Image (cartoon, rainbow, N blue to C red):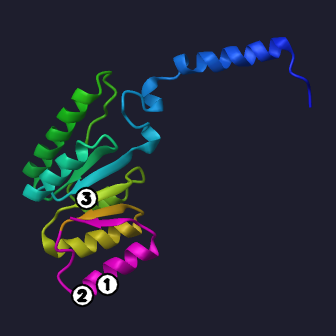
Amino acid sequence: MRALNRRAFLKCTAAALAAPTLIRSSALGADDQPAPSNRIVMAAIGLGGMGKGNMSSFMHMKEVQMVAVCDVDKEARDEAKEEVDKYYAQQVKDGSYKGCATYNDFRELLARDDIDAVAISTPDHWHAIISIEAAKSGKDIYCEKPLSLTIREARAMVNAVRRYGRVFQTG
């Protein structure tokens, strides 16, 4: 092991002191914001009354970044996108916000690798199939109640969540 001479010590110290001024504070989670690597990238599926309420609640959590919305109703989808875009455009003052994606088919949304979790607020008969597919796709899940219409569906949901090691929350 080489001895550390004065010149090498000063060089390393200067680099260490300069690093915080060279790295953007947002990358480190400054201003009471989590670092991007600590954010939960999320999407909302189902944008009726409960769905929009859930989307808005998650979106206002500093740990969450809502990146996509999905509904078969184009009007609901477009209204939700507008709300998400407006909120994040106000939060990100440097113009780096890229916008919220919209989907008509939940399977296309679940195919995205960058989404960590989904909020499912669809009509009740869709909860089981979307939850199971979300677990298979590697997404953590928040699902509105009732979780399912039958015990068999509920067991299938539990089995999928366990099999794929996902987090499941109901509300």
Residue 76 percent across, percent down from the top left: 9, 51
Q: Secondary structure at mark 3?
A: strand
Question: Which amino acid lies under the numbered mark 1 shown in the image of this protein?
Answer: Arg
Q: Are marks 2 and 1 in contact (CB under 8 Å)?
A: yes
Callout 1: 10 Å neighbours few (<14), some, many (20+)?
few
What mark, if any, has residue 102 been given in the picture?
none
**For residue 112, which quarter of the picture?**
bottom left
Image check: 87 left or right of 63? left
| Alpha-carbon span between mark 2 and mark 3 | 22 Å
Q: Which residue is mark 3?
A: 119
Taking the spot 37% from the left edge, 48% from the top edge, the residue there is: 40
Taking the spot 26% from the left edge, 29% from the top edge, the residue there is: 91
Q: Which residue is mark 2?
A: 151
Q: Quadrant of the C terminus?
A: bottom left
The boundaries of the magenta stretch are 145-171
Q: Secondary structure at mark 1?
A: helix
Residue 113 percent across, percent down from the top left: 42, 53
The residue lying furthest to the bottom in this view is 152
| Alpha-carbon span between mark 3 and mark 1 | 20 Å
